[in-house]
């Protein structure tokens, strides 16, 4: 965890050191696709998508995508195993809704099906999903839990499985298959996930929700109620400082080997400009996460993005 640099200092408090977990980036995305069951295996397992519990619901979603939207099917398979279920379930849900109009002959029947999905979504949030494969998979998503992250490691894992996965997919679209690019994507994805969690804290607190890592809060003796009350005490700022420092070091580490990353991968990493912009702003206000200036747009951000793109840097 980031070591707080407390005491009387002039100017913005510098970011501290944090324990970065130097893990190997995931294998090539196409290798992940090859290890997954092909269309024939999916067809053989769709029969399991009925009965109590619907054990084959994930395979049902993959088969639905294979039949109706093959590009989405391939994109779902590119996600790491940890979030592949969520990706295929969300895409399958979109397919289900999109095909309602094409698969019904009467408007009344279509309205009935849309009503079914409207009630299905409501039932998912009540932990009572209908016995329908796509609904079952959506219900399993972790985002429905609305629970705080237990540790910084848990937040980083979630960030890599979401933001990082999108970066890996973007690299595939750009035709980049490079170990250093994957490594940079891993750290940038974690930095983006952490910054997103920080930026959303004022909004979440207005809805009486706090998702910041609990282990960091406990370390500084801060409770969720402190954030709900928008407390600006030193301990609250220390929590934000530690979390922001972790994002800063992930960003710094990703940039430390930019010379080894192919230039073709740089467009995928341009969001580092906005990440650095937010980290600098929160540093200037001494890590007061509720400061009004953090909600203001940076009108020069497009120019910074253009300059970084022109310089072939991230």
Image (spheres, rainbow, N blue to C red):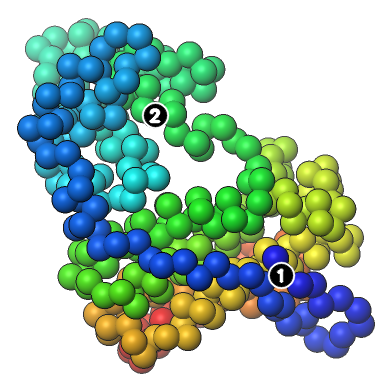
Q: Say what secondary structure mark 1 lies in.
A: loop
Q: Residue at x 22, y 71 (%)?
A: 177
Q: How many marks?
A: 2
Q: Is residue 34 visible?
A: yes
Side of 114 relative to 237 (left or right): left
Side of 193 relative to 166 (left or right): right
Q: In the rendered image, which residue does mark 1 sit on?
A: 2
Q: In the rendered image, which residue does mark 2 sit on?
A: 138
Label ID, residue 98: none
| 3D distance between C-alphas at marks 2 and 1 | 35 Å
Q: Quadrant of residue 285?
A: bottom right
Side of 176 relative to 190 (left or right): left
Task: Looking at the picture, tell me which residue is in the foreground, 21 or 286.
Answer: 21
- As displayed, is residue 212 above or below residue 268? above
Q: Say what secondary structure mark 2 lies in.
A: helix
Q: Residue at x 25, y 45 (%)?
A: 76
Q: Quadrant of residue 72?
A: top left
């Amino acid at each position: 965890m980031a070591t707080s640099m407390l005491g009387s200092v002039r100017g913005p408090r510098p970011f501290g050191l944090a324990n970065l977990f130097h893990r190997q980036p995931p294998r090539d995305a196409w290798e992940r696709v090859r290890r997954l069951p092909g269309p024939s295996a999916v067809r053989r397992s769709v029969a399991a998508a009925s009965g109590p519990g619907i054990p084959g619901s994930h395979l049902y979603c993959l088969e639905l995508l294979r039949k109706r939207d093959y590009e989405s099917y391939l994109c779902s398979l590119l996600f790491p195993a940890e979030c592949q279920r969520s990706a295929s379930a969300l895409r399958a849900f979109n397919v289900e809704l999109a095909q309602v109009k094409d698969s019904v002959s009467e408007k009344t029947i279509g309205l009935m099906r849309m009503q079914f999905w409207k009630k299905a979504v409501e039932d998912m949030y009540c932990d009572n999903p209908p016995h329908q494969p796509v609904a079952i998979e959506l219900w399993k998503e972790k985002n429905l839990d609305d629970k705080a992250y237990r540790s910084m490691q848990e937040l980083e894992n979630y960030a890599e499985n979401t933001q990082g996965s999108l970066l890996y997919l973007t690299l595939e679209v750009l035709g980049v298959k490079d170990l250093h690019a994957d490594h940079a994507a891993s750290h940038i994805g974690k930095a983006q996930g952490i910054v997103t969690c920080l930026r959303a804290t004022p909004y979440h607190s207005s809805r009486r929700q706090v998702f910041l890592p609990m282990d960091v809060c406990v370390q500084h003796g801060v409770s969720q109620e402190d954030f709900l009350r928008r407390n600006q005490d030193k301990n609250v700022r220390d929590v934000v400082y530690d979390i922001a420092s972790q994002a800063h070091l992930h960003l710094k580490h990703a940039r430390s080997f930019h010379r080894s990353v192919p230039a073709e991968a740089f467009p995928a990493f341009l969001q580092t400009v906005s990440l650095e912009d937010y980290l600098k702003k929160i540093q200037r206000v001494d890590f007061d996460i509720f400061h009004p200036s953090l909600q203001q747009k940076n009108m020069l951000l497009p120019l910074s993005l253009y300059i970084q793109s022109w310089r072939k840097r991230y």
